Image: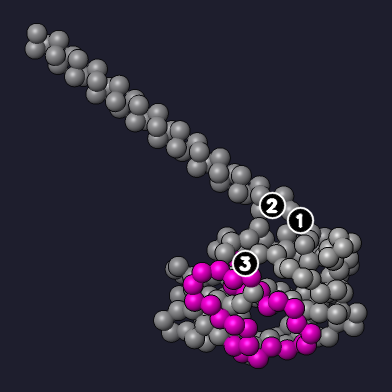
Amino acid sequence: MKKEHKKSKNRIFIIGTLCLVLLLLVLLAIVLTMAVSHKQRNTDSTFDWAGIDELTVTSENLQNGIWDDSIANTDRGRNLSPQLSWEKAGNAQAYVIYMIDPDGNNWIHLISGTLTKEELAQGEITSINKGTSDIGYIGPYPPAGTHSYEVYVFALKQAKTDYAGKVNTVCDGIDRIAQELNADDAGASGNIAAYGKLTGTYTK
């Protein structure tokens, strides 16, 4: 009797173990599927940058490829949007600026909204500390280590009424944003007159 009881307990243990292993395999398959789906979502959209004029962009807050602490949203930072200057694009009606962290799943740190000048003073874009926003700024706050932070200045032939993405959220990458900016509000392509890029790193 004891022998049969022991065998029964062994069977229950084996079945339980197999069920647990099966559950773990199912969970692993789900995670891998989501990862592949996310990668495809981020790489399906490509933008043809060839033929678009390039602008030179500079910042007083970028020294030797490193963003200074004043733009960071960390204990030692001030969460102030960076000072930026760029060339005038002759056939542009407006400009819009994005800052993205490609090392943080294309996290958006800045959307300026429509601009009609070629310079921003430090702190000119409204800072946010939490939540999300259609326009505004939140400084670099890498969870650990060093991340790159890319600033894109787009010169637009026509200003947009809405801009892709939200500040303090992930996006599908700068190619997707460029695609949306390149279409005017009527849907016609060729709206980007020129663009400029500035890249720097920040270490927590």
Residue 36 occupies which quadrant of the picture? top right
Q: Quadrant of the C terminus?
A: bottom left
Whether residue 102 appears in this view of the structure is no
Q: Residues within 10 Å of mark 1 (few under 14, many from 20)?
A: some
On the image, the x and y values in percent for residue 38 come to: 60, 49
The residue that label 1 is drawn on is: 46
Q: From the viewer's perspective, is the residue at label 2 or at label 3 nearer?
A: 3
Q: What kind of element bears circle 1?
A: loop
In this picture the colour scheme is: one colour
- Whichever of labels 2 and 3 marks the residue nearer the N terminus, that label is 2
**Do labels 2 and 1 touch, CB within 8 Å?**
yes
In the structure shown, which secondary structural element does the residue marked by tag 3 occupy? loop
Q: Quadrant of the N terminus?
A: top left
- The image shows residue 136 at horizontal and vertical percentages of 61, 77
Distance between the Cα atoms at labels 2 and 1?
A: 7 Å
Total tally of numbered discs in the picture? 3
What's drawn in magenta, residue-wise? 107-134
Q: Which three-letter amino acid code belongs to the residue tagged 1?
A: Thr
